[in-house]
Amino acid sequence: MNWAVIFEAQNLALFGTGIVTTLTLLAASLASGAVMALVFALLLTGPWAPLRWLVGAHTYVIRGTPLLIQVYLIYYGLGQLEWIQDRWDTVWPWTHLKEPFFCALLAFSLNTAGYTAEMLAGAIRETSAGEIEAAQAFGLSRFQVMRRIVLPSALRRTLPAYSNEVVMMLHSTSLASAVPAVVDVTAAASRIYSDYYLPFEAYLAAAAIYLSASFCLIGIFKLSERHLLAYLAPRKAH
Amino acid sequence: MKKLLFAIALGALSTVSFAQGKDLKVAIDPTYEPFTFKQDGKPTGFDVDIANALCEQIKRKCVFVEQGWDSMIPGLMARKYDVIISSMSVTEDRQKQIDFTDKYYNTPSRVVTRKALNYTGPASLKGKKIGVLKASTQEKYALGELKPVGVDVVPYEAQDQVYLDIKAGRLDGTVADHVEVTGGFLSKPEGKDFELKGEDLFIPKYFGIGAGIGLRKGQDALKGELNAAIKAIRGNGVYKKINDKYFKFDVYGK
Amino acid sequence: MNAYVTAILQGALLTVAVSVSALLVSIVLGLLGAGAKLSGRPVWVAMATLYTTVIRGIPELVLMLLIFYGGTIGLNNTLEWMGSDATVDINPFVAGVLTIGFIYGAYMTETFRGAILSIPKGQMEAAWAFGMGRMQTFVRITAPQMVRYALPGFTNNWLVLIKATALVSLIGLQEMTYAAKQASAATRSPFVFFLFTAGLFLLYTTLSLIALRKLNARFSLGARHGTL
């Protein structure tokens, strides 16, 4: 095993770039995904049937197809459409589709939005009937019930499942290596593998990086669960 | 419990194959028209035909194994196949890892960009995006000569994906094998705004001496057989027949 | 165009083969893992915990690349070191099935463990009081009830597993995604081919969902939802 190669300056720098790209992708897709998920979840549990159907169809497709295909569709597929090609040099939103990083980001955001929306919608639906009835008995409007009773509780109850989703997203960012020119941790490892013919060392290093990142994320979530879901924990003995 | 584990282990091992004698496993990357590509789902092209001709000469059956370009050499070293016949150039760097037979063709590489672009040398491409095949000699050239003068070099997994992105407008051009880019891109509708620029690049430092058959080190017997076979088909007209099927000129080169 | 569509459909058969084989491997590993974790013996618990923690902390793609490229070299080096001349080739199908099975075995472990823990202990104790052996208790009491609790998690794992098979295209197995990628680059029409492949995956997941929902319906529990 030739570990010295991994620790050479330029290879460490390559992994460093990879880590930065991975974390940026993760943070950005989680942030935009979360915003979209909130909107989608409200539409999924809302009173307007066409919107429910539309968003439902979207989450259904997202959850029914592999992320890899979604990435290819957005990067290669959209790039093929002449309607987009005509606009992506000049018209603002479409210019971003030219960049591989943005395409990967879009694919990941839509993906996490789809999954999180369903999780959140499920938590909203599972809100204890008694609480809602009590709020309605108090004369709160639908919007107020949502904002003051249902959402705070639903968001907290989604936390355990969401922590899983965040770790899944970290792992999914490794698919960014399928898009040309995006150098994340996996792409860095593949580069070192094909340059130096050291598959074990390169991929074990990548695995170690992901493992540490996963542990950090799980740790952060455990702490926040202890704080935010304290009211659901079993009572401690006095 | 123990019996179950043993049965599972046996089952897993039985699916792992042990290499036999007669078949010659040949690795190809079928994204490199007209040398190696797929037609009607079958591998075809100059490389494939040469491989079949050589196999006939050494009386073994060619079994083609598809492989991505950037793991061609690692795959050979991991014994996934016996030889690489996929337009792999013989370079000093590669010879550190594997062995090569004599060359079976030699064609230069060339820069390809839009007709409208006034190309006067690597510096005139500054700021442009040039796509190259990962782990290829053209990538080495691009990283060695183009990147230092400010060209954005983008590596791709397969050459035809480079053409896909050129067509989409994400890339301004590529550095590729002269013959391959003509057959695989310029002669097709999407290549009509592009042309070969500058001169043929014959720099041995990057491009080596031509394409040879790659094998693992220490396989001198096989290497000897294949070298003899190459000489044989050069002499008896089989090479010329395959050459003329794809090209209007002699691709063996100097 | 036609040859490419045929290649994708043939790839679809491979996808089904890989996913079903991997599912079987993962069920076996899941049962073993859950058993180890619940056995109470420190060695088994530690090994099972190591297994589930490490697997769930590494991306599937990285694990697949490690096993496929690293595994073959490792095995061949070991054989050389042992003095044998034989070469071993782990083909992409086996590498894919073992990797995916191995990964989802970890997820199944957690699903099965949670399911077994949900069964009231009194039932198992009653079975032992009746004189039923371990195996008998498992087959007649634990397993049927475990299925009911495990189904939601199992369905989830199965759907994610189907999608993970797309990753095997990246180690060269010529399943749907690989065929679609080659077709799209050669014909310069990625949109059509990837959309078609996405459609095939959607068909596969939909059929699975329908089948598993029917199964779930036999065990579903009623719940009251508040009307908003």
Image: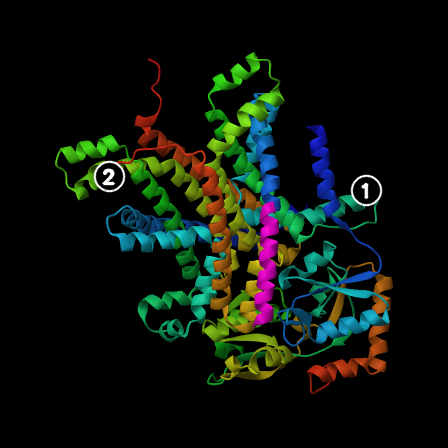
- Which quadrant of the figure has residue B21? bottom right
The image position of residue A37, as x and y in percent, is 33, 49
Which kind of residue does numbered mark 1 sit on? Met
In this rendering, is residue A169 above or below A232? below
Whether discs 1 and 2 lie on one chain: the answer is: yes
Would residue A183 be seen by someone viewing this image from the given angle?
no
Residue nearest the viewer, comparing A154 with B187? A154
Task: Report in which chain the residue with disc 2 lies.
Answer: C
- What residue does disc 1 label? C82
Q: Earlier in the sequence, mark 1 or mark 2?
A: 1
Q: Is residue B98 above or below residue A202?
A: below
Label 2: which secondary element: loop
Residue at disc 1, secondary structure: loop
**Viewer-side residue, B171 vs A161:** A161
Residue C57's tag is: none
Kind of residue at badge 2: Thr
Residue at the spot x=79%, y=62% of the render?
A: B24
Task: Output the chain of dot 1.
Answer: C
Q: Could you classify mark 2 by the number of other residues whose Cα lies within 10 Å: few (under 14), some (14-19), or many (20 or more)?
A: few
C4 part of magenta stretch: yes
Disc number lying in front (1 or 2): 2
Neighbour tally class for label 1: few under 14, some 14-19, many 20 plus, Cα within 10 Å: few
The residue that label 2 is drawn on is C227
Which quadrant holds the N terminus of chain B? top right
- Locate residue B172 relative to residue C102 in the image: left or right: left
Residue B38, position in %: x, y? 64, 71
